[in-house]
Amino acid sequence: MGIRYRHELCDRWLQSNATVQQVFSELKAASFEPEFYRKHEGEIMREFKGKFQPQQVKIRKKLFGVF
Amino acid sequence: MPIIQKAGMALFLLAIALLTAIPFMGQYRLTPQMVEEVVTDTGQLEYVSAELEEMLGKTYSSKFAYISDLDDAFSTSATKIQDYNQIDNRETEVNNLEEYMAGQYKFYLTRKATTGTIQEHTGLWLLLTIGLGTLGAFLYILPKLGLLPGIKNDHIFHSQNTGLGWIGYTIGTLLILFYVLLYWYPEYITEWMVLTDPISKRISGNEASQWFFYGLLYTLAILVMGVRMIIKYRHSRYHIIRTLSVMFFQTAFAFMIPEILIRLNQPYFDFKNIWPLNYNFFFDYNIEQFTSSGSVGLFMLIWGILLVIVAVPLFSYFYGKRWYCSWVCGCGGLAETLGDPYRQLSNKSLKAWKVERWMIHSVLVFAVVMTAGVLYTYFTGSGTFLFIDTYTLRATYGFLIGAAFAGVVGVGFYPIMGNRVWCRFGCPLAAYIGIVQRFKSRFRITTNGGQCISCGNCSTYCEMGIDVRWYAQRGQNIVRSSCVGCGVCASVCPRGVLKLENGEEEGRFGKPILIGNNSVQVFSDLDYIR
Ligand code: SF4
Ligand code: SF4
């Protein structure tokens, strides 16, 4: 089973030569998984950090998960 | 088909055959006490008992003979009462035996007089019919757990059942017959009520009516077919949670709580049934019951009104129509569980969409006018509203919409026109929520760029007949008043193009743009020149 991402956002990343940091900071917003599905973004980021020790990745935390 | 599934199907069919045979197995014995209990008007009782004299103590083994004798007795009494009321210097007036009242009397006299093996061995028959049927159904459904999770709709249009074949038409005919008996000839199915007496007595303490029998069957259908639904879509958490929700609301809110309220001497009330679907909410007898049942009744009245004016707009704004239609509602619950095998039969044509919009909104107008008339009569005491007799108005609504459309057509046509015939063409509440969903809501189905391969699965399995593919191909959001948010279009899509979402209202309708990786672009004139 695959993971679904928003075509529009992926396209923008490619077009603008986005950095890994940028991609990661927007990764959650790019998810196109159906509602109630388990989300994998956290896991992906943890894995990536463990392997590559990248520079600080900042994720915009949502206030109450809404705003 | 594995042997266990075959056995399950055989048991299920046997149970259905037995259930069908039961109404022919009763015996009928009328006693004077029954007549006294049922015919409460003393004036009428005198005439009716005289005519029923011959039937008393006699054991009928044919329902038709019994009912025909009953009919004769009542029509003679009716004429005799009329004749008496013509006499000039009569001592007292006897209330005329109206047809409706006579029908009620005849029904209760049949219900009470029903005896025979069903009455004597109720438990055994209950096990042999409803028990065996449930067991058979589970034996048929559960082995499907052995298949890999995921959508499997192979040969769905080749099946005689789900592809408009003879099995489908037979099931449709039987369902229609069932509803006709249930609504208009309940005296012919009194044995079924006797059958469910033990359960009814345990819950509410009363004897079962036809509505209890129907409610029990309805709930069982949602529960058993709900298990099937969960197994079929077990790869999707959305469907699992949603199906559990309809199963819960049917069992607790529609079935158990009203019966328990009766046991506690409170008004019968389904807390999740909203006017105008619950079209008799504002009927005089209901309002009287609410206002005369202390604080509980008052709470019910206020609750019911708040549902209409606050809950519907609020929840529909945040979550769209689905919060009710495919998560809570009983009609929706049956459609999403029992009706799921037939969802592909909904008509997707433009014509059907046009008919749908005229029809459903006319029913909404009808419901509003009817209720306004009934309330007008309640408050002013005048029987006419806009030159129409309000009693006829509400009787017509009950007959045409409440019974014929919602029941007979709504469920009877599952195997012919899909599982949402009522929700799509007839439900006034769906029309109301649909208006909210169309104009003021955060709900939409988004399409993922240029991923659509035009396979058409989404349109095929949309039970509301929405041509989802048309939107997906253009990359446009699907915002339609009829969409019940069942999520099946998204589940059957092989490319994961569709997603049900609640989001900002801005940009909700979306522009029809194809987004491919530079495959299609919209150039302005300026771009060309450069
Ligand atoms: S458009 Fe999709 S979610 Fe809406 S009713 Fe049709 S299948 Fe269900
Ligand atoms: S099911 Fe998916 S791929 Fe097929 S037509 Fe619909 S949106 Fe396109």
Image (cartoon, coloured by chain):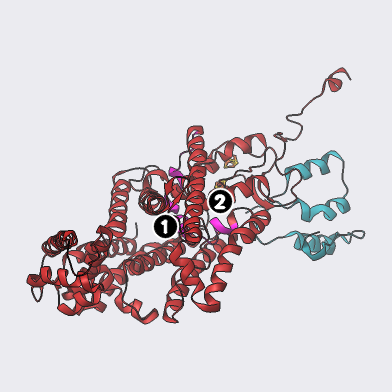
Cβ of mark 2 under 8 A from ligand 1 = yes
Image quarter where the C terminus of chain B lies is top right
Q: Is residue B344 magenta?
A: yes
Q: Is B498 left, or right, of B278 in this rendering?
A: right
Q: Is residue B302 magenta?
A: no
Q: Label 1 crowding class (10 Å Cα cut-off): few <14, some 14-19, many 20+?
A: many
Q: Amino acid at mark 2?
A: Val
Q: Colour of chain B?
A: red
Residue B215's place in the image compared with B436, above or below, is below
Residue holding disc 1: B338
Kind of element beneath mark 2? loop
Kind of element beneath mark 1? loop
Q: Position of residue B528 (x, y in %)?
A: 84, 19
Residue stretch in magenta: B323-349
Image quarter where the N terminus of chain B lies is bottom left
Q: Which mark is residue B229?
A: none
Q: Colour of chain A?
A: cyan
Counting labels gives 2
Question: Answer yes or no: do the residues labelled 2 and 1 have beta carbons within 8 Å?
Answer: no
Q: Is B219 left, or right, of B527 in this rendering?
A: left
Name the quarter showing ligand 2: top right
Q: Amino acid at mark 1?
A: Leu
| Most common secondary structure along the magenta stretch | helix
